[in-house]
Image (tube, grey):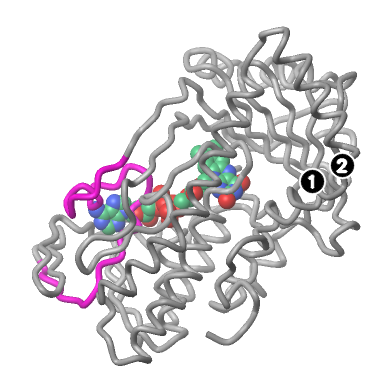
Amino acid sequence: LVGAAQALALAKNNISCVLVDKARTQDVLKATHDGRVSAISQASVKVLHHIGVWEELSFHANPIERIMVTEGARSAKVVFDANEVGEPFGFMLPNIYLRQALLRAVLDNATMIDFREVCGVKDVVITPSVQAVLEDETLLRAELLVIADGRYSTLRDKVGIHARKFEYGQEAIVCTIWHEKPHLNTATEWFFPVGPLAVLPMQGGHHSCVVWTEKEGMAAYIAGLPKATFCEELALKLQGVMGNISLESEVFRYPLNLFQASRYTAQNTVVIGDAAHAIHPIAGQGVNLGYRDVAALTEILVEAKRHGHTLGNATYLQRYQQWRSFDAASMIAVTDGLNRLFSTEKRSVKALRQLGMAAFERIKPAKMLFMEAAMGVSGDLPKMLQSKPI
Ligand SMILES: Cc1cc2nc3c(=O)[nH]c(=O)nc-3n(C[C@H](O)[C@H](O)[C@H](O)COP(=O)(O)OP(=O)(O)OC[C@H]3O[C@@H](n4cnc5c(N)ncnc54)[C@H](O)[C@@H]3O)c2cc1C
């Protein structure tokens, strides 16, 4: 999701590249919606617009007009209303449409993007330039290597970038459901001691994506339940607020862990997306963080080129590192902290949490800060996210 977007952003700004992916294009293009969906922030929409894929994607996107955070039907709630910021917080978009739109755009940009599919990078040698050996033994040379091979990145290690890893002991159960009561474009995050459960609004008013966190082991048990029992369990967990529920997709499971690269640059190399920072999905911000990397790195590389430097110029790469590390560290702290704060049954913490939520609901400036962060429009924004020319 992030590497292809980066290649397109470079192409759009007259920087050519080779894009290498292990996946088979035809398999991705033939696939249908499988139940996996991402919350795409307004800032990410600007990136997707810049690279020319948003118009096509907007037909599949459902706006998020309200975000509700609660510990249960009768507990304190915090409600964020998009009317207060004048536009939806973001959109729910099935992952497959995003992958397909990116791939089609990559194929349409053949003059700027030399795309090698079904072919992983096997090895990397950093000399004054970069040499990458592909699995078919092809040798590629470039000024800069952009590593975007996801949270279990192998290339990160090959260039000597260490990543801190933390296992949450939780798994996310992911599926798409039909529900009797309409979602009214509301994304609801239920907090339970075992972890959060998000119900995220999809097109049609009665369809939502569920990201249900459970302890390892329990997640396997729940995901393996017969369909009808699974839906009954889910309806019970949601205390009936969505009415009857039926399953509309396969049930997926993802182990939840945190990866944080110790640095985002090495000689002639940068890391972006989950390869740099893979976070807990509690706030639905992983790919959004990756798209902010894309916006920042594109701006820095365009500037380096404009000033006659190579793309691997250390001073410019250092600026990428400084720019992105603060945003990523803040997001890691928020997602990690939220997960810990809500995943406890200690009575003292629970009482304080309820008080805190009731107070937060009434503090307008704090709510405004949260809403801007959810939209990805706070902090030191790259020009692409301000819709300004780079
Ligand atoms: C349950 C769950 C729910 C989520 N929900 C949201 C959400 O609502 N909103 C949000 O913003 N984020 C969400 N995320 C996070 C989001 O899915 C990730 O941040 C995003 O997929 C990261 O994209 P990426 O391109 O960096 O990595 P990936 O999507 O992992 O892509 C890595 C790519 O690298 C390729 N590759 C791997 N190894 C090699 C190699 N050696 N050579 C060449 N290619 C290679 C792979 O084929 C793949 O195409 C969620 C995550 C989970 C687990």
Dot 1 amino acid type: Ala
Name the residue tied to disc 1. 366
Is residue 270 visible in this depiction of the protein?
Answer: yes
Residue 101 located within the stretch drawn in magenta: no
Displayed quadrant of residue 319: bottom left
Dot 2: element: loop
Kindly identify the residue that appears in the image at 45 percent across and 60 percent down: 2
- Is 370 situated left or right of 85 in this image? left
Per the image, is 146 magenta? yes
Instruction: Measure how far apart labels 2 and 1 are at the Cα level.
Output: 6 Å
Residue shown at 52%/85% (left/top)? 390
| 106 vs 280, nearest the viewer | 280
- Residue 285 location, x and y as percent? 58, 48
Q: Is residue 298 above or below residue 20?
A: below
The residue stretch that appears in magenta: 138-163
Residue at which label 2 appears: 363
Residue 156 versus residue 339 in the image, above or below: below
Could you say which disc has been placed on residue 378 in the image? none
Please tell me in which quadrant of the rendered image residue 283 appears: top right
Asked if disc 2 and disc 1 are in contact, CB closer than 8 Å, the reply is: yes
- Residue type beneath disc 2: Ile
